[in-house]
Image (cartoon, rainbow, N blue to C red):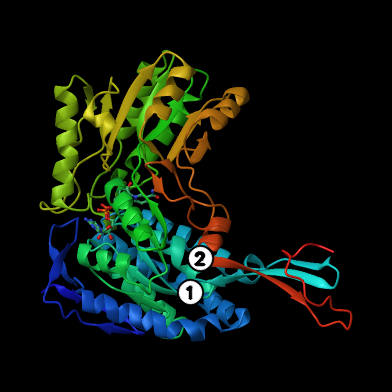
Amino acid sequence: MPTHIPHWIEGARREGASGRTGEVTDSATGEVTGAVALASVEEVDAAVAAASAAFPGWRDTSLAKRTAVLFRFRELLNARKPELAAIITAEHGKVLDDALGEVSRGQEVVEYACGVPSLVRGGFTENASTNVDVHSVRQPLGPVAIISPFNFPAMVPMWFFPIAIATGNTVVLKPSEQDPSASLWMAELWKEAGLPDGVFNVVQGDKVAVDRLLEHPDIQSVSFVGSTAIAQYVYETGTRHGKRVQALGGAKNHMVVLPDADLDLAADAAVNSGFGSAGERCMAISAVVAVGGVGDDLVARIAERTHTLRTGDGRKGCDMGPLISKRHRDRVESYVEAGEKEGAKLVVDGREVTPDGAEDGFWLGPTLVDHVEPGMSVYTDEIFGPVLSVLRVDTYEHAVELINRNEYGNGTAIFTNDGGAARRFQHEVQVGMIGINVPIPVPMAYYSFGGWKNSLFGDTHAHGAEGVHFFTRGKVITSRWLDPSHGGLNLGFPQNA
Ligand code: NAD
């Protein structure tokens, strides 16, 4: 019997009442393991009402007390992260080690948020005008919404909620309906850490829930991560309803390999970043750009390594797990077929892999496609699967031109031993996150995560200083304490004196 996966409202599980549910599967077996509630408008309203009711109390809770809850959450998460990793693997399919890595990267944001007292510290200017002082503060927004994708069911929500909560906001999280259980585990952990009921709520759901959050008058901001078309829709709809929105979209990340690069290092990096988490990472490398004749050698080294990977059930110590759903698996496969038809050369065919897992798992092995041209769909579209394309260009300039012409600008990497070339690359390339001999340059929590172009709508990246800025608004207070020499009536615009 599939488990019921409910909402979390006002500090307790709340069974779905809409009569609609979605199927949750174990990607490695194909089995339906859960029935997730899909919220109605009324259920979303109940979660927002809980967040609104909890807001005044949480906003007025001292920084010392808020921080104490965050430290407890951090300790509990750190001690029990294998439990969360197991939940992620059971629904998403990524291998256990990778799921643990996801939780650890989310935990870094919790740790950053533990420093909230210094992050929200304002400024003070004494005697800006005679006997006049000016100071600034940053205050929370109110109830905020977080809408997350399937590929990082723990880390992506954690990009946002630790900072939102630390800065005094209350949260309604709408996780992906494909792997919703991690959100409930995190909600229970918050309760155990002592977070007051209503500060963190989860509504399970689909478009109905998202649309209600986007238009609900009490929701002050929306942090979204998902595919580009939906990110753009969320940005446009949310801002039209007067909300602050950060909407992170899809990606097509290039890895440039210059002729002077260490090709073994580059080949390792291409395999790790192309096939880790079955390519279902927004920072995965999906296009390797071989510059100036290194193509054959590089492809041979990548192929050799790819053949050693073991695809199978993430609980069995394999290197790569299944894809999230049968539908997604078939879509990814269709790009491999299209690439072949369009004239690319299939060097490693993931369709031939025998997985170490159940027959009905959503399997597709690591696939390497060479001689890909910019017009082919295997290059133009975000595939979000274990398909690594290799393009060949003559010069460094052509490589940069290719990247800058691409509609996405999430991450990119260059492999070279030439410091001058690397420096020029970081300056010229139109991408938000850049790696130099680092294939997945995900910024640390105290920097901000976000892409350019169609990889981000809005201008605020996630976590770091930009995250704190996003979840707070500024106030500037100008004050003068009465002095017997006050100036009397003056209708002119205030000027310094
Ligand atoms: P998705 O866009 O299908 O779903 C994301 C969220 O939007 C989910 O919560 C989903 O329920 C909701 N949603 C889906 N369709 C909707 C609709 N029509 N109207 C309103 N809401 C809708 O994305 P996904 O398949 O879950 O995740 C994969 C995508 O996320 C990839 O494109 C990947 O690149 C992207 N992603 C980007 C980043 C980043 O930092 N830029 C990080 C992770 C994932």
Residue 205: x and y in percent read 22, 68
**Rendered position, 286 above or below 65:** above
Quadrant the N terminus occupies: bottom left
Q: Is residue 110 visible?
A: yes
Q: Tell me the kind of residue under disc 2.
A: Phe
Name the residue nearer the viewer: 226 or 391: 226
Q: At 25% from the left edge and 45% from the top edge, which residue is drawn? A: 311
- Residue 335 image point, x, y percent: 18, 34
Q: Identify the residue under disc 2.
A: 471
Q: Quadrant of residue 375?
A: top left
Name the residue at 34% across, 77% down: 48
Residue 489 drawn above or below residue 352? below
273 displayed left or right of 471: left
At 44% from the left and 27% from the top, the residue drawn is 256
The quadrant the C terminus occupies is: bottom right
Give how far apart the Cα atoms at labels 1 and 2 are: 7 Å
SS at mark 2 in the image: loop
The secondary structure type at the circle numbered 1 is loop
- Mark seen at residue 169: 1
